[in-house]
Amino acid sequence: MAMAEKLFKKFEEPEESRPDEGWRERLYEIIFESNTKSGKLFDIVLVILILSSISVIMLESIESVYIKYKFLFIGLHLLYTFVFTIEYILRLICVKRPLKYALSFYGIIDLLAIVPSFLEIIFPQTHFLMLIRSFRLLRIFRIFKMVGFLKESRLLVFSLLSSYRKIIVFLLFVLLLTVFLGSFMYVLEYKHNPSFSSIPQSIYWAIVTITTVGYGDIAPQTVLGKMLASFIMILGYAIIAVPTGIVSASFLKEWNNEKQSPHKRCEHCLLEGHEYDAIYCRKCGQKFNDDDVEPVT
């Protein structure tokens, strides 16, 4: 869990370092900081460019639109590639430790946003990988001071991580169950129904049925097959509720831990475990403020 918290913190705030030189420091303020007028304007323009580039990629996937505006799409892609490449280079230039930024979460995402544009020259099929640019929109949390939403999502992420063992066991059980039920359905149907032509095909049907997706491309025809299918359909509703309960229980546990604030202590008497909305220390009676309460590591 400590590793998860460390990774989440790195995800929230990339560790770029401010340079000491004048022009690089000014460039750093514009590119990395959103609390200045120029920095916020830069970030808003960047978000607009990212959204427009994603829209262009989606539009050109429509064949009729691509044929009509092919040269416009090519020109826009060259423009986006040029702008994002220059932006990435400027980010490397204005930080004190370029390698540290390049290996950070946002640094990797920024690099992946431009790599497909160059790979497309050799591998044309990688063109639509440019949709990776959508991950750059995560910066919107910093631009519009929405870090609080990331802090709330931390609770959900920790809930999932704390219950991953139970979820893995549950998924293994479901996997074994679908293999068994699919094989059983194959035995019942293969002589009477060409749709169940193999055990893997039958397992596919079992997965579609037990997850209540129900494509309808394969359906049993025998009486016993329909009875088994009915049982699997009902079983599917019960199975869906299990992971929901596991995650909900973990979420309540994490929320209660957060509410009790075990990581805060009174600076006067060093008593820990005060509630998150406590105003006075329950031992010494001192009033809490930013100076009196400090995190416990």
Image (spheres, rainbow, N blue to C red):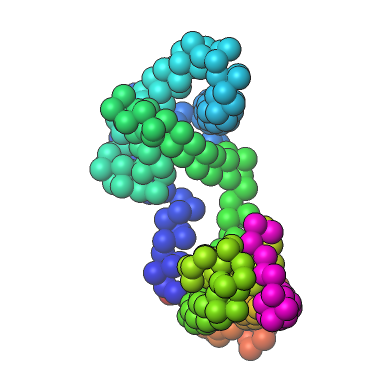
- Of residues 68 and 243, the one drawn nearer to the viewer in this rendering: 68
- Mostly what secondary structure, the magenta segment? helix
Residue in the picture at 52% in, 78% down: 183
* Total count of labels: 0
Residue in the picture at 45% in, 54% down: 11
Q: Which residues are magenta?
A: 216-237
The quarter of the picture where the C terminus appears is bottom left
88 vs 145: above or below: above
Q: Is residue 125 left or right of residue 212?
A: left
Residue in the picture at 46% in, 33% down: 128
State the residue lying farthest toward the bottom.
Answer: 283
Measured as percent of width and height from the top left, residue 81 is found at: 40, 23
- Of residues 109 and 19, the one drawn nearer to the viewer in this rendering: 109
- Of residues 77 and 281, the one drawn nearer to the viewer in this rendering: 77
Residue in the picture at 62% in, 40% down: 144
Residue 62 on the magenta span: no
282 vs 76: above or below: below
Q: Is residue 51 left or right of residue 225?
A: left
Residue 217 on the magenta span: yes
Residue 73 appears in view: yes
Q: Is residue 242 left or right of residue 32?
A: right
Measured as percent of width and height from the top left, residue 120 is found at: 35, 28
Instruction: Tell me which corner region of the image, top left, top right, bottom left or bottom right, holds residue 145.
Output: top right
Measured as percent of width and height from the top left, residue 54 is found at: 55, 31
